[in-house]
Image: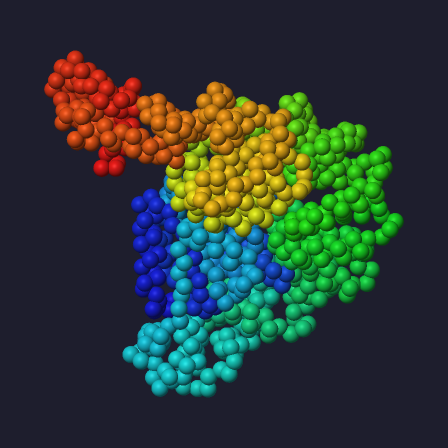
């Protein structure tokens, strides 16, 4: 894009940072920067300087896209369209699609001529696909991705930027995004994204300041090609206020009266143009922030456009407009906004009408439909404005562009009262539009507004449409549930009452799915099974196989997880059959079936099912979120199987890739638990601090989150020696009134309860807790798979049973055995049996180290060190000789007798004699125990 080449003044530090980042990228690194500043401060100029040097090297690829705003909010995919256009220009269509992989069809949402979008895959994949495409390119060559004007970004573009920043590691990619800081207020959705990226240390922020007086003078002198700006410099400094763009615009007025307002300042160059050039600028301004040549020709006529070439050239040479390949744009968006205000009413209506009509002949995309709706609104053709706003609203919602959908829906509601016979024009009643807009607004997380719209829709719903009202009640129930209210359950009951069995079963099925899901996630298993059964039977009658699959899925989960009924697996397998190749119910099968196998202790089977689902998801191009949920189930199975290094590597790699969402709640809780048990307690505490608010919000509705979060946080409280806090956290869940017991999640909590109670009993002055309520909880969990294991742990923690009973149960998660060995060693030590305690603690160390359970290994080694210190300390009767100490160090390094002999230049027999003496003196039975004592002694001394 050709631009005014003002020198870059006062930005040496910022440009240096970006060039250093570029050097890192060329060396195989990845970096992300966000450049913030007010309008006109020079964000684009800074990036021009950077990218020009990049393009000159012939090696690094630069792709650039800019977000754009309109009357109804952000134009969807505007920046992504620019990025994709540059990629296709560089690689060609065939290579672009091949690089994008299985999900390439999602690119058709941006460029429908590129590829057809599949209807059999859920929407919402576009951010993953765009980010994946760019990262794959950056694995083969250095890539600079520039995304400008994020203050106008739609939710899909923000998600793509977020995804790109999180997945760039391992590629040669520099991502630089800009936004107007003065246009991003407290409630702007961009603030949440930037805060999350900064918290994750994934982005470096550059704030561009205003120029000081000396820098203003330097810029002015360079632009005037003179040593100084003359007598008008003081006025220039005062009026420009250090904003570079204003300095450039004001220079033309030095020596004359300066403009009185910002609008006059922005229009300085425009008003110096001839009337023909001004008219052409108004044509471009009405088109939007970028006016493609083809659109101008189709809207205004090819002959009329050809006749304006001289005027267009004049505007470009005056630096009002710039030529951008096949389009015109204003040198600065502020100028475009000012020129729009120059349009006369008739001119505005004519131009917007012409653009709307021309765009209607182009391939239909969400962004095109949104632009058409905006132009009809600008033309004040209200019936067409309403009709197209409703059409664009539907398309945006179907594509997952929720911010745009919400804005268009709100626009349609605004126009509605101004249009005679609005229902006929819109093609739907006002109450139907209200509930659909409420759903779109819910997706943008403006829950209060969504609830208000849904209530208005319910109030307006006609009594003679009970089935439509039932579906609206279903939608309203979802909205109110997400707002944290239990009103949704009442709304669902009301909806079901409107649709008795046998009447419009297709409508009843939708309500039954919601009713069963609500009961399932809240742990109300009996209720979930009843509604899921009815849902399945009704869905089969009406041929709704996807809903029938979901119903059996939920029934299977409730039977297996909450009731310990393995017959639920039959439901799950039948659900898979009904799903066939429909990924929505099939993906739900893989997710829930793997989880069910997990809670029944079939960890290897759970791993296999989740792995199969993840592979299917990747092959289908269903989006990273779908695959990551299944991979998260795989990681959980790896934890239970004792493959903690593999699980930890997955969490460390994947958790930073997940932005704040319901899914991140599950992942972060398991990551915190694993970090803690691996011995990195500080890191676990850090995850808790950044996640606790989300955990509390989701936990109000989901039993799995409530229980697991309470257990992890209680474990951490015990490590801080706060047993009272730990017991309170556990009691708030276990003893709270509400749904029946959820044994799959609550049993392991009782082990932590026992540890907290025992700690409180040992605390001087503390009141001994009443254990009776917890025994009642334990009795209610008797049907659970691991009841025998966790009841033995509960008894052992309270001193009511031996730890050997726990060790005698050959099932359960991998960390239980090393933990039980540690606790039995501790009990033996308290009983004075030091020799057997050494054996148990050494076994605990070996078992814990085998799975990388650093928390248990560290505690066991500390106990061993306290036992063995006396045996290795000089002055004891059985002290080790210097040679024996040498041998012991080599034993600790894992050397055999033959290797020790070779290292110390002694015979293998002599080495064996030394090892036997060491074992006797230390009072241990194995080389492993001796090695543990050696390592512990080395650490302590």
Question: Residue visible at 67% across and 73% down?
Answer: 345
Depth order, front residue of 548/820? 820
Residue 700 position in % (x across, y down)? 62, 46
Splitting the image into 4 quarters, where does residue 730 fall? Answer: top right
Residue 350 position in % (x across, y down)? 67, 67
Rendered-image quadrant of the N terminus = bottom left
Q: Compared with residue 606, is residue 314 higher up or lower down, i.e. above or below?
A: below
Rendered-image quadrant of the C terminus = top left
Compared across the picture, whether 41 is left or right of 459 comes to: left
| The residue positioned farthest toward the right in the image shown | 464
Splitting the image into 4 quarters, where does residue 19 fall? Answer: bottom left
Q: Compared with residue 180, is residue 829 higher up or lower down, i.e. above or below?
A: above
Q: Compared with residue 231, is residue 849 higher up or lower down, i.e. above or below?
A: above
Depth order, front residue of 812/579? 812
Q: Compared with residue 260, is residue 652 higher up or lower down, i.e. above or below?
A: above
| The residue positioned farthest toward the top in the image shown | 909
Q: Is residue 563 visible?
A: yes
| The residue positioned farthest toward the left in the image shown | 905
Residue 443 position in % (x across, y down)? 63, 50
């Amino acid at each position: 894009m050709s631009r005014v080449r003002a020198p870059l003044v006062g930005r040496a530090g910022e440009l240096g940072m970006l060039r250093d980042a570029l050097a890192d990228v060329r060396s195989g690194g990845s970096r992300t920067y966000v450049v913030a500043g007010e309008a006109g401060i020079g964000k684009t100029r800074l990036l021009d300087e950077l990218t020009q040097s990049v393009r000159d090297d012939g090696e690094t690829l630069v792709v650039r896209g800019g977000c754009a705003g309109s009357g109804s909010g952000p134009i969807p995919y505007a920046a992504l369209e620019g990025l994709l256009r540059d990629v296709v220009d560089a690689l060609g269509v065939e290579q672009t699609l091949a690089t994008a992989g299985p999900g390439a069809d999602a690119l058709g949402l941006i460029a429908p001529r590129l590829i057809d979008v599949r209807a059999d895959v859920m929407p919402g994949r576009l951010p993953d696909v765009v980010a994946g495409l760019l990262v794959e390119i950056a694995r083969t060559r250095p890539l600079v991705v520039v995304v400008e004007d994020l203050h106008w970004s739609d939710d899909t573009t923000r998600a793509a930027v977020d995804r790109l920043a999180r997945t760039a590691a391992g590629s040669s990619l520099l991502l630089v995004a800009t936004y107007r800081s003065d246009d991003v207020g407290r409630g702007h959705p961009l603030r949440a994204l930037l805060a999350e990226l900064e918290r994750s240390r994934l982005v470096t922020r550059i704030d561009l300041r205003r120029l000081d007086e000396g820098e203003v003078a330097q810029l002015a002198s360079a632009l005037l090609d003179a040593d100084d700006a003359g007598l008008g410099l003081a006025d220039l400094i005062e009026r420009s206020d250090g904003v570079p763009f204003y300095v450039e615009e004001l220079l033309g007025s030095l020596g004359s009266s300066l403009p009185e307002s910002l609008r006059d300042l922005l229009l300085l160059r425009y008003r110096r143009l001839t009337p023909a050039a001004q008219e052409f600028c108004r044509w471009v301004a009405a088109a939007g922030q970028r006016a493609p040549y083809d659109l101008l020709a189709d809207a205004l006529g090819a002959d009329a456009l050809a006749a304006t070439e001289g005027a267009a050239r004049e505007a470009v040479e005056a630096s009002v407009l710039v030529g951008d390949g096949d389009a015109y744009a204003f040198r600065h968006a502020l100028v475009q906004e000012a020129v729009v205000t120059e349009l006369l009413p008739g001119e505005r209506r004519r131009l917007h009408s012409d653009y709307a009509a021309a765009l209607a002949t182009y391939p239909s995309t969400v962004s095109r439909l949104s632009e058409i709706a905006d132009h009809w609104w600008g033309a004040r053709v209200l019936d067409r404005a309403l009709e197209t706003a409703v059409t664009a609203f539907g398309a945006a919602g179907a594509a997952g562009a929720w911010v745009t959908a919400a804005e268009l829906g709100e626009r349609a509601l605004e126009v509605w009262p101004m249009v005679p016979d609005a229902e006929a024009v819109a093609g739907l009643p006002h109450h139907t539009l209200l509930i659909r807009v409420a759903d779109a607004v819910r997706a943008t997380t403006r829950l209060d507004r969504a609830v208000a719209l849904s209530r208005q829709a319910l109030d307006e719903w006609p009594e003679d449409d009970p089935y439509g009202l039932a579906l609206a009640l279903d939608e309203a129930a979802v909205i109110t549930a997400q707002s944290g209210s239990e009103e949704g359950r009442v709304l669902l009951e009301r909806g079901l009452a409107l649709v008795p069995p046998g009447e419009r079963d297709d409508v009843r099925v939708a309500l039954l799915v919601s009713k069963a899901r609500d009961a399932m996630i809240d742990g109300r298993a009996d209720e979930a099974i009843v509604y899921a059964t009815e849902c399945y039977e009704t869905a089969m009658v009406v041929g709704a196989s996807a809903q029938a699959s979901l119903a059996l899925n939920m029934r299977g989960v409730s039977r297996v997880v909450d009731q310990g009924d393995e017959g639920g697996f039959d439901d799950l397998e039948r659900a898979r059959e009904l799903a066939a190749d429909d990924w929505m119910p099939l993906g739900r099968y893989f997710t829930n079936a793997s989880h069910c196998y997990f809670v029944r202790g079939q960890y290897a089977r759970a791993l296999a099912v989740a792995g199969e689902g993840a592979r299917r998801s990747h092959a289908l191009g269903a989006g990273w979120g779908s695959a990551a949920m299944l991979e998260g189930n795989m990681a959980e199975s790896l934890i239970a199987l004792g493959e903690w290094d593999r699980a930890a590597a997955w969490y460390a790699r994947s958790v930073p890739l997940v932005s704040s969402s319901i899914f991140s709640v599950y992942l972060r809780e398991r990551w915190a638990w694993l970090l803690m048990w691996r011995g990195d307690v500080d890191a676990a505490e850090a995850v808790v601090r950044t996640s606790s608010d989300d955990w509390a919000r989701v936990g109000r509705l989901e039993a799995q989150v409530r229980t697991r979060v309470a257990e992890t946080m209680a474990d951490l409280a015990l490590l801080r020696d706060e047993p009272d806090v730990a017991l309170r956290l556990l009691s708030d869940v276990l003893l709270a009134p509400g749904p029946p017991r959820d044994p799959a999640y609550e049993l392991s909590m009782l082990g932590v309860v026992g540890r907290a109670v025992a700690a409180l009993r040992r605390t001087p002055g503390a009141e001994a807790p009443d254990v009776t309520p917890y025994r009642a909880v334990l009795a209610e969990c008797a049907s659970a798979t691991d009841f025998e294991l966790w009841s033995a742990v509960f008894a052992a923690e309270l001193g009511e049973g031996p730890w050997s009973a726990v060790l005698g149960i050959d099932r359960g998660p991998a960390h239980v055995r090393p933990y039980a060995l540690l606790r039995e060693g501790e009990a033996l030590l308290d009983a004075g049996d030091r020799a057997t305690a050494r054996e148990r603690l050494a076994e605990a160390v070996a078992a814990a180290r085998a799975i990388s359970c650093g928390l248990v290994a560290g505690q066991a080694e500390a106990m061993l060190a306290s036992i063995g210190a006396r045996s290795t300390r000089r002055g004891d009767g059985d002290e080790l000789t210097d040679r024996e100490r040498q041998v012991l160090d080599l034993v600790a390094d894992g050397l055999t007798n033959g290797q020790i002999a070779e290292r110390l230049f002694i015979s293998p027999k002599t080495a064996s004699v030394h090892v036997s003496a060491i074992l006797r003196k230390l009072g241990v039975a194995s080389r492993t125990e001796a090695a543990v004592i050696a390592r512990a002694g080395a650490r302590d001394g």
